C-alpha cells in the first residue's frame, strides 16, 4: 500500500511501484471515477475522432479476419496499386 498527499491544486504523485505496474508514463491519460466512496484510477487511450472508425467492432472483426488469412498464407501481395486494381477487376 502506498500513501500519497494531496498537494496544491489537488495534485497527487502516483507512486513508482503503481506507475510501473500499470505502465503509466508522462503524458498518458487517466480516467478517475468514484465507486462506492473509493477513487478508481485507470489508464485510458484517447483516440482522435478521425481514427475512431478503426476501433469499431466491424472494423476490428475485419482486421482479425485479415490477420488470420495472412497467417494461413491466404493473401496476395502487390508492388503497385495498379497491379492490385487489375487483379481485382479480373
Image: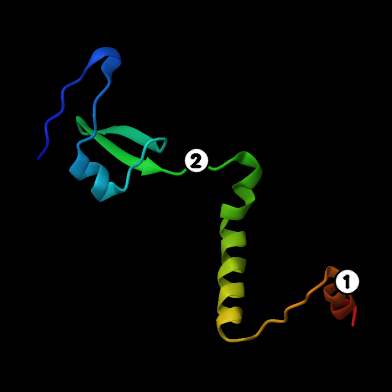
Quarter of the image for residue 72 reads bottom right
Q: Position of residue 3 (x, y in %)?
A: 11, 31
Q: Is residue 7 left or right of residue 53?
A: left
Label 1: which secondary element: helix
Of the 4 image quadrants, the one containing the N terminus is top left
The residue that disc 2 covers is 46
Quadrant (top left, top right, bottom left, bottom right) of the C terminus: bottom right
Query: Disc 1 and disc 2: Cα gap in Å?
Result: 36 Å
* Residue sticking out furthest to the bottom: 73
**Residue 4 percent across, percent down from the top left:** 15, 28
Disc 2 packing (10 Å; few <14; some 14–19; many ≥20): few
**74 left or right of 36 in image:** right
Number of residue marks: 2
Q: Counting residues from the N terminus, which is met first, the one under dot 1 or under dot 2?
A: 2
Mark 1 crowd level (few <14, some 14–19, many ≥20, 10 Å Cα): few
Question: x, y (%) of residue 20?
Answer: 25, 47
Q: Quadrant of residue 57?
A: bottom right
Disc 2, SS: loop
Question: What residue does disc 1 label?
Answer: 82
> Left or right of 51: which side holds 8?
left
In this rendered view, identify the residue nearer to me: 64 or 1. 1
Residue pictured at 26% horizontal, 42% vertical = 19
**Which numbered tag is attached to residue 2?**
none
Position of residue 18 measured from the top left corner of the image (x, y, whole percent):
21, 43
Residue occupying image coordinates x 87% and y 72%:
85
Looking at this view, is 27 or 32 the one in front? 27
In terms of depth relative to the viewer, which is nearer, 13 or 47?
Answer: 13
Q: Quick check: marks 1 and 2 in contact, CB under 8 Å?
A: no
- Which of 86 and 27 lies nearest the eye of the viewer? 27
Q: Nearer the viewer, mark 1 or mark 2?
A: 1
Amino acid at each position: 500500500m502506498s500513501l500519497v498527499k494531496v498537494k496544491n491544486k489537488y495534485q497527487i504523485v502516483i507512486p513508482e511501484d503503481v506507475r510501473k505496474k500499470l505502465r503509466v508514463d508522462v503524458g498518458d491519460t487517466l480516467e478517475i471515477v468514484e465507486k462506492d466512496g473509493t477513487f478508481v484510477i485507470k489508464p485510458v487511450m484517447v483516440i482522435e475522432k478521425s481514427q475512431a472508425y478503426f476501433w469499431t467492432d466491424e472494423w476490428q472483426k475485419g482486421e482479425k479476419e485479415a490477420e488470420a488469412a495472412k497467417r494461413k498464407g491466404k493473401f496476395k501481395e502487390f508492388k503497385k496499386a495498379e497491379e492490385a486494381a487489375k487483379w481485382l477487376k479480373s
